[in-house]
Image (cartoon, helix red, strand yellow):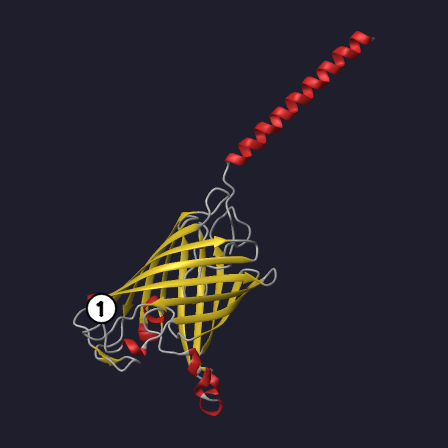
Amino acid sequence: MKKYLLVFSCLFSFQSFCQDDLMDMLEKEKGNQPEYTTATFKATRLINGQTIETVSKKHLNFWISHRFGAVNSGFIDNFFGLDEARIRLGLEYGLSDNLTVGLGRSSQEKTYDYYVKYKAIRQSNKVPVTVTGYLSGAANTMATGYTLPSGSTLKFNDNLERQTYCAQILIARKFSDKLSLQIMPTVIHFNKTEVEDMKNDMLALGFGGRYKLSKRVTLNAEYYLTDHGNSSVSDKYHNSLAIGFDIETGGHVFQLHFTNSRGMVERHFIAQTLGEWGKGDIFYGFNIARTFSFDGKSKKDKH
C-alpha cells in the first residue's frame, strides 16, 4: 500500500508540475500576442474633422450634416440662426477594415469632396497609439467671379484652379474607456488662392478628444490652430473651435454641436472660419451617420 501511495503521489506531483508549466507557456504566448484597442471614437468624424476610425469592410456610412446660422443673428429676423441652413451629404465605404474611401457634396460653394483614409498603426498592448493617414480633395463648382464671405472675388480660369487638397496624419490614444485624445497635423494646398498675396500652402495643427458620459453619450471637442499667414485677408479668418455630443442609438450616431465654423470640408472649417466665439458667431449644427452592412456574414450593422 505504501508503494502504491508513493507512486500515486509522484504521478500527482508530476501532473501538477506539467499543468503549471503548460499554463505558464500559455500565459507567455498570450502575452506575446497584441491585444488591439477598439472604439477609440464613436464615429469616423469627431465634429467637423476626421477621427482615426475607419469603416468596417463592406460597410457603408451615410452622413447628413447641417449647419444653421449664427445664434447672435437675432430672434425676430433669423430665429437665432435656425432660418438658415447649409448641408452636406456624404458616403464612405470600407474597402477593408483599415481602408475607407468617401465622397460628399456641400451646399457651401457647391463643393464636391472626396477622400481616402488608411489606418496604418493600431493601438495595442504593444503600441501606444493609433495612426491613420487621410488625403482629400475638394472642387468648388461656383460660377467664376463670385464673392466670398471675406469680400474677395474669386475668378477661375480652368477646372484645375478649383481644386483644394488636404493631407493629415491622425494620431490618437484611448487612455481609458472614458477618455480618448487625438492630434491632427495638417497641410492644405490651394491651386488658386483668393488673393495674390496669400500662400498656396497652409499649415494647421488640430487637437481633439472625447469623454464618455454614459454608455451611449460622449462629450467631444476639437480645435484647429491654423497659420493663416500675413495676407490682406488673413485677419478675417480665425481658428476653428467646436464642442458637442455624440449620441448613439442602434445603427445611428447623432452628433449635436456648437462651432464658429459653418463649413464642413477642410478647406472651409480649417482655412476659412470667419466666426468668433467671443462675438457670438456660434453656429448650431448636427451630423447624422447611418451604417449599412453589405457583408453577408454580418447579421447586424457595425458602427
Direction right: furthest residue: 1
Direction front: furthest residue: 230
Q: How many labels does the image show?
A: 1
Which x, y percent locates residue 5?
Answer: 79, 12
Disc 1 residue crowd, few under 14, some 14–19, many 20+, Cα 10 Å: some
Q: In this view, does 194 lie above or below 13?
A: below
Direction bottom: furthest residue: 76
Residue at horizontal 36%, vertical 65%?
104
Q: Which of 173 and 79 is in front in this view?
A: 173
Q: Is residue 218 above or below residue 141?
A: above
Q: Is residue 91 left or right of residue 161?
A: right
Kind of residue at badge 1: Lys
Where is mark 1, residue-wise?
A: 199
Residue at horizontal 21%, vertical 79%?
145
Which x, y percent locates residue 47?
Answer: 45, 66
Q: In which quarter of the image is residue 26?
A: top right
Which x, y percent locates residue 226?
Answer: 33, 68
Residue at horizontal 34%, vertical 71%?
268
Which x, y percent locates residue 225?
Answer: 37, 67
Q: Is mark 1 on a helix, strand or loop?
A: loop
Q: In which quarter of the image is residue 222?
A: bottom left
Q: Quadrant of residue 265?
A: bottom left
Residue at horizontal 50%, vertical 69%?
244
Q: In which quarter of the image is the N terminus?
A: top right
Q: Nearer the viewer, residue 226 or 169?
A: 226
